[in-house]
Image: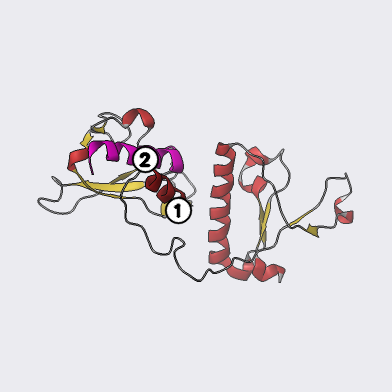
Amino acid sequence: MNNAQWKSFFLCCRSVLGKGLPFAQRSDSWCAWTTFNAVHSGVHYWYSGIPDYEDILDTHIADGGLWGQPFDYDDLAHVVIPATFYWETEGGPEFKNGTKVQNIRLLSECLTGEGIPHPHRSDLGKSSSIDRITMQLFGYKDQGLPIEDIRSDELAEVTLVAKPEDLRRIARFLQFAAGEIERMGKDYSHLHLSDRDKTFEGSPHFVVFNPEVSG
């Protein structure tokens, strides 16, 4: 790819995947890359979040930014954008870990629109048969009733009104809940968003329920 294509590539990644940081636990995006110089004597990959807008220059990734040193576009041999990436806490008394999801499908659409060549997995929607996802949504109107008198109804549609940073918090909560369901199986019943993230304590209740328990 030429310099203009590389610049468009990184701008698409930053726009679609979100702000990058050097630690996966706190980063909204993640990638790995290597250079032609790096593969002369072996195989070495760097990894970090996607560079920020001010680091994405016309001919290279800026020195002193998120990637720590300059990388000329002409020297980039391979950049990997994973569909999911693993994170874990750095130090502290309580170890936590999980995975985060990156919207590869939307990124592919952005890159295609910019005319950027890119390989992508065939399971991103090209299959002629589609596995339909089945889930249920339940809710109730806030009428000030005591908890014992509340009856949830099955919903056909929900509308989530939230700022981008809050949506990312919810996405991280859903990733955590999915991991806990897989880890605990039927021993896992449900989890409230506000119990996991105290910033949502003043918001409507958002609950994930294990389908194996709910029947």
**According to the image, label 1 marks what residue?**
105
Asked if the stretch drawn in magenta spans residue 55, the answer is no
User: Disc 2 marks which amino acid?
Assistant: Ile
Residue 133 image-quadrant placement:
bottom right
The quarter of the picture where the C terminus appears is bottom right
The quarter of the picture where the N terminus appears is top left
Front residue of 103 and 214: 103
User: Disc 1 marks which amino acid?
Assistant: Arg
Q: Is residue 119 left or right of residue 175?
A: left
Asked if the stretch drawn in magenta spans residue 9, the answer is yes
Q: Determine whether 51 is above or below 126 in the image.
A: above
Residue 92: x, y in percent?
Answer: 45, 43
Residue in the picture at 13% in, 54% down: 42
Residue in the picture at 35% in, 27% down: 54
**According to the image, label 2 marks what residue?**
50
Query: Dot 1: what SS?
Result: helix
Q: CA distance from mark 2 to mark 1?
A: 17 Å
Residue 167: x, y in percent?
Answer: 58, 43
Q: Which residues are magenta?
A: 1-21
Q: Determine whether 153 is above or below 61 in the image.
A: below
Residue 15: x, y in percent?
Answer: 44, 38
Chain-order first, disc 2 or disc 1: 2
Q: Main SS of the magenta segment? A: helix
